[in-house]
Image: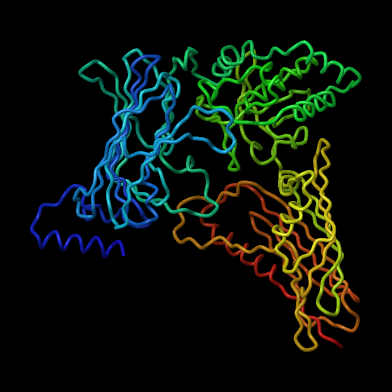
Amino acid sequence: MIKYILITGILLTGFAGAAQNKYEASTIPKELLPYASAVIRNMEITSEVKDLNTSIYKHHEVVTVLNKNGDTNAGIEIWYDKNRRIKNIKGTVYDEFGKAVSQFSERNFNDYSSYDGFSMFTDNRIKYYKPAVVNYPYTIDYEFEISSKQSLNVGDWKPITEVGTAIEKSTYTFICKPDFIIRYKQLNYAGAPKESITEKGLKTYTWEVANVKAIRSEPFGPHPEMYQPIVKVVPQKFNYLGYEGSFTNWNELGKWVYDKLLAGRATLPPATVQNIKSLTDTIKDQKLKAKAIYEYMQRKSRYVSIQVGIGGLQPFTAADVDALSYGDCKGLVNYTQALLAAADIPSYYCIVEAGDLKRDLMPDFASVAQGNHIILCLPFKNDTTWLECTRQDSPFGYLGDFTDDRRVLACTAEGGKLMRTPKYSAQESTQIRKAVLELKPDGELAGSMTTIFDGWKFDNRPVNPGDINEEIKNTKKNYGINNLEIENLQLKAVKNLKPVNNETIKFSARDYASQAGNTYYFMANLANRRTNVPREVKNRTTNVYINRGYTDIDEITYNVPEGFKLDSKPLLVNLKKPFGTFTATAVKVGNQVVYKRKLEVLDGVYPKEQYQELVDFFQAIADADNYKVALVKN
């Protein structure tokens, strides 16, 4: 359809004898069209540090949207606050022939708070505009400028903004005074930046990419930093909202955070210090003492996000959190650190890039922009322990899949040091299920089933205390068994040093087995069937990345009516691949059908050439999971 529109545009323009407009969709190079829903015709980004207290960001972009999947490229979202001011917003929308159809300015933007649903305090706001265009292709040309009262965070350059977006040309220019020193890190970018001096004597660094084809979304793909061009720029000296500093490595950055942002913010009221001493005086073991303090913090406080002023980097004081009983990740970590200090237990305030997809801080390039969350480290001898302070239900020493297995920065009095959070291996992250069930002559299934969740899978069954009806509703959704009726549900989290979640349900499901004549049919795999298989991708461009490993073990025993024999071929599947193993069996022994299944998936990076093998692996699992038992009367 895109090619047809473009060819039509060329014919009409040629017939009219008119000169081509530079924004005409037909002028896009044909080699950029495959997989593209939008094409960035030109993007010019400029960051200028005028002095330590002032930086200017300029953004000019021309993008042609080829179909509705590319509409996100035309949406303009600009955030601001009292320290970050927006200036000079303007733009024009063109049709497929490059004819201007509308213009817009700042007054056409919606302006709203960037409230995220959980932030109690935020002074961030967002201006947003999206052209009301329904005919494709169309082009939007816009620009804006931002003035910021800081020189620390100048932002990364990421020319590829969306999957399915091609680039004709994109440039990033950093401007500063001759004596202003920066460090930069290039990812997937060949060559060095162009350096020059302007007529005003300013120093410039310019990076450029051109004729970049669109990237497809590929299942099990790695983080974009592994294959997309990105440039990170960090000033050596800076001022961040009144806090001056200088760093060239993680040690110096950690020292700045400790000395400037954390200094004097850990003082607690005398009464709270006395409470902690009374709570822990009879506990001899340091780790158990820390556990009691952590659970005290959880009972007393709750998490809220605070994004006011320097709230994005500096914690509220421990005294404020103690009085208010709430705080963000920074405030709660600082508060917990102060409580531990009252019991003479040392700890580290740690910066981490949190998220389901694991991301390391780069060991050779220090920058504030790499971290988005704070956790706490307790450096017990030979037993380093990590705490997530924003969750009231998190077991002591448990991080979960939000901050596991990644490099973090510990900020100490001696400076910053890089550490690594624990990894939950495939062998440790288990879901073990056992069930003993009765299949009745009318096809109803009844019995009990117990499942234990360990490692990062602990969070697969979060407990909602006091709301059993909500838990029953969620459990029904989790299993998707037709006509499921839960008679009794027990959820219990064992919050020891290796926490597990236990789920036990007593249930029934009418018509679980269907009957045709003298034969009963039912699914052997009751509760853990794979229903999705990654799609096939020809000419894959990225390696296969499995973010996190796990092991699922199921054993289900069906007590079946007497006088029946197995009329289906016994299930026997045994697969072994570089990225995992799978076994499944279903056999009849006496009046029982015993189903066993074990799936182990191993995290890691695998060659892109093995992707089809991965698809086949999961397809074979899906096929085995759909195995039906057929029982016929003797």
Vertical position of residue 122 compared to residue 357: above or below:
above
Residue 219 in percent (x, y) is at 53, 55
Residue at x 64%, y 54% (from the top left corner): 579
Count of numbered badges drawn on the protein:
0
Residue occupying the far left of the picture: 17
Q: Is residue 143 left or right of residue 551?
A: left
Residue at x 75%, y 52% (from the top left corner): 471
Residue 519 in percent (x, y) is at 78, 85
Which quadrant, please, contains the N terminus? bottom left
Residue 439 in percent (x, y) is at 84, 74
Vertical position of residue 80 compared to residue 128: above or below:
above
Vertical position of residue 357 compared to residue 373: above or below:
below
- Name the foreground residue: 387 vs 276: 276
- Name the foreground residue: 60 vs 363: 60
Which quadrant, please, contains the C terminus? bottom right
Vertical position of residue 141 compared to residue 261: above or below:
below
Q: Is residue 213 left or right of residue 278?
A: left
Residue 302 in percent (x, y) is at 69, 30
Q: Is residue 223 left or right of residue 31?
A: right
